[in-house]
Image (cartoon, helix red, strand yellow):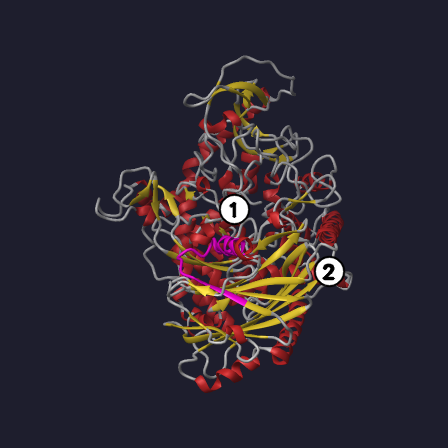
Amino acid sequence: MSGGDGRKTARNRIKPSTSTVSGEDHRNRKGLRKERGKDQLRILDVNFVLLGFIIVTSFVALLFVFRSVQFSDGDDQLPRVITPFPGPKITDLEMFQGEQKESLYWGTYRPHVYFGVRSRTPESLVAGLMWLGIKDSRYFMRHMCQDADELQTYGWNKHNGRDYGHQVLIDHGMTLTTSFLKSKVNGSGYGGDWAVQVGVQSEKLSKDMPDMAHIFFYVADEGQNALSLGRSVSEIYEKSLLAFGSRADVGGWELHLKSMDNFEVHHVGLKTPHIHNLSDLVQGILGVQVRNFGHLELPDTSDDSPNIFVYQISARTTFRADIAFVTGTDIDEDRVEGRVESLTGTSLISQLHKKEKEFDDKFKKIFNPSDKLDSESVEVGKAAVGNLLGGIGYFYGQSKILFPQPSKHRSDGDSILYWPAELYTAVPSRPFFPRGFLWDEGFHQLLIWRWDTYISMDIIGHWLDLMNIDGWIPREQILGAEALSKVPDEFVIQRPSNGNPPTLFLVLQDLVCGMKRNKFSATESKNISAFFERSFGRLEAWFQWFNTTQSGKYTSSYYWHGRKESQTIFELNPKTLSSGLDDYPRASHPTDEERHLDLRCWMLLAADCMRSISEELVEKKESRKAYKETAKLLADFDLLNKMHFDKDYGAYFDYGNHSEKVRLRRQLVEKNGNQPPSLELVREVLEEPVLRLVPHVGYVGLFPFISKVIPSKSWILEKQLDIISNTSTLWTNYGLRSLSKTSSMYIKRNTEHDPPYWRGPIWMNMNYLILSSLHHYSKEEGPYRERAETIYNELRGNLIRNVMKNYKQTGYLWEQYDQKKGNGKGAHPFTGWTSLVVLIMAESYSEC
């Protein structure tokens, strides 16, 4: 998936044996590149003082801060890296308090489980669903979303992000549905009440399959407050109470179970601080019961003062169970029974139908699917939106930050703990990446802001509130025990020198443009203005962090920090994880001479967005001038071409110390300690690198096209359209591949264990950005307008058809798609940025 996020396997550094090899001869453009590199450097040296003065003077104060010591004011102070940004939090704005905050208090904020509910508070009361699935005549406990369960499909078909969702899960002949509803009535405690309707239906795939189905619903208190067992669990038909308790946030609460079907209910009460391994605990208890008594049922026992109750509901299929959670029961006991009745049975069904219709109507109004799309495509679009919104999670914890300096604040090894923080965010993939990723989130919000502007701003505010005093935001958020349980230890620590594409500016630019075009109501406009007024200081710090820490040797040049020459003996091309494009080929030998084209264009977006904000929404005259000049500099077409354009290829490239003649060859490698040497793939450089443009045609080279800086009448635009539409480079019948077939790195493994990731497969986020620019140029006057429109229509059709075909065949949206056959690859379900297919269907792009 997206990179820079621990999604690739780390390798230990070991010492290779030395040997001399010869290799296949490649086309040598070294002399040409070397001379061109010298010419470019001379041009940049001449212009450095004139052009660089604007940026340097604007940010000299911040530069001083960045070059200063690592500690705030002294050795007794917190290290700067874990010192919060000194400004009011965005999430403390009035618009995110009061009714808005309460309306979002409860939700399906546990995306890593098939069904889970929690509140947006650190030590929440949580609830969830487990069941016994059957495969090869054996039982398996289902709880955490994971590929190994091999469900035919699952995901929220519909979810509005607030108070309604409907999900279908198909597990080897068993179909489960979960329908979620929230309600706020007189007498409810803070956040209101909620209910879930669970439906179970089985198809007997073999005579060995049992007729009985077993589902498990649990309630747990993360704060380890004791829960009380309902008095009539063994007499469920007379009284519906399962459990009750009291909390400071919601007051008294009760959990009820109601159904018209016959079933057995058993339970177990547990006292444990660990909830993330609950399914293992329950499976172990069931195993003991089967071995000792021959019964597949919980023992109806409880630890003293339990903070978890698990209820086993066993019945012959088909059956349906309604579970209602009501709050404020200590204040309004007389109305509790009526509130439970309203959240179960026919009343619940009626409310769910009403919410479903509201979702359908809202989807049609916002995304206005084309008449050219069939009903099946529209339903897939709804599922994409539903699972993105239903996958929004709430997390609380402390990030681990690399901090090799001695400090009393260090937690263990070379790491230090960030301050305790909360994060409300969408996630890329519920089974594989059920946590926050910074560069993914900008793409998520392109869809979410169109659906619910308040939710979108709330999420962006949470991310910006994670900023430290230097303007840095950890790019992968692994907060809390449940999130940590899904991540290998080596990927937990975040490096404060590394960034991630500032994609949130894509959304912020959309909001600014929407304000200019009067697309929002008066109330929305007022709140958006307040949001930008509060967030501007943080956005400035974020921009300046990039502009100083990621800047190159020459004005208007940038490069992604974090590429390590010392780790390249096993890598064909050193990965650039911080760029998000992981193994996309860059200069073969990382140096500070590099100029990364994509980062330059991200900085143009950021500078232009900051200019727009300071001109339209906040009174920041001094900042306005600086951002305007910076944006003008980065949009300078002639300067861009001098730094990154290759006339022979008609393409834009990175620049750096590069050799095309590298390969992986199996060699004897010495191991650390007493381990014997082993044969492994080791990189060999067959020709010394030189400073030059890096000749790999692909997504990175299209960033100037994506940024719309190429004039619509320029012959260079025609060359970009050639690259996009040529089947020998990027074009396929399924979407644009990430790297050209002509590249020496095309579909090449990067290490012994790392298959190609951004070296050929088709990615929806980049195809969306390219489509947006094609759409733009198809409306611009110029000789290439009609051709841009033709390519746009064909590419859009290819992407929609392929996503639809895969969804129909597999039941999922995928992380990426194969460039040869169009098959879904990688993580699934992946309703992060692959959900952008909805905006492609709706032809909804940036209007800036």
| Viewer-closest of 429 and 535 | 429
Q: Residue at x 50, y 64 (%)?
A: 218
Q: Residue lying farthest front?
A: 293
**Few, some or many C-alpha atoms within 10 Å of disc 1 (few <14, some 14-19, many ≥20)?**
many
Query: Regarding mark 2 in the picture, which secondary structure is present there?
Result: loop
Identity of the amino acid at label 1?
A: Trp
Q: Is residue 299 visible?
A: yes
Q: Position of residue 126 (x, y in %)?
A: 47, 64
Residue 748's label in the rendered image is: none
In the rendered structure, the answer to whether residue 791 lies left or right of residue 703 reads right
Of 568 and 700, which appears nearest the observer?
A: 568
In percent of width and height, residue 692 lies at 54, 27
Percent x, y for residue 8? 53, 39
472 on left or right of 349: left
Q: Earlier in the sequence, mark 1 or mark 2?
A: 2
Q: Is residue 709 above or below residue 96?
A: above
Question: Which residue bears the numbered disc 1?
Answer: 602
Q: Could you say whether the residue bearing mark 1 is in a helix, strand or loop?
A: helix
Q: Is residue 620 magenta?
A: no
3D distance between C-alphas at marks 1 and 2: 51 Å
Q: Is residue 729 above or below residue 104?
A: above
Residue 765 seen in the figure: no
x, y percent for residue 811: 70, 54
* Three-letter amino acid code at the position of disc 2: Glu
Task: Tell whether position 286 is magenta.
Answer: yes
Q: What span is in magenta?
A: 266-289
Residue occupying image coordinates x 65% and y 54% = 134
Identified at 69% across, 33% down, the residue is 741
- Which residue is the extreme one toward the bottom? 334
| Depth check, front residue: 672 or 84 | 672
Q: Looking at the rendered structure, which numbered label has been put on residue 203? A: 2
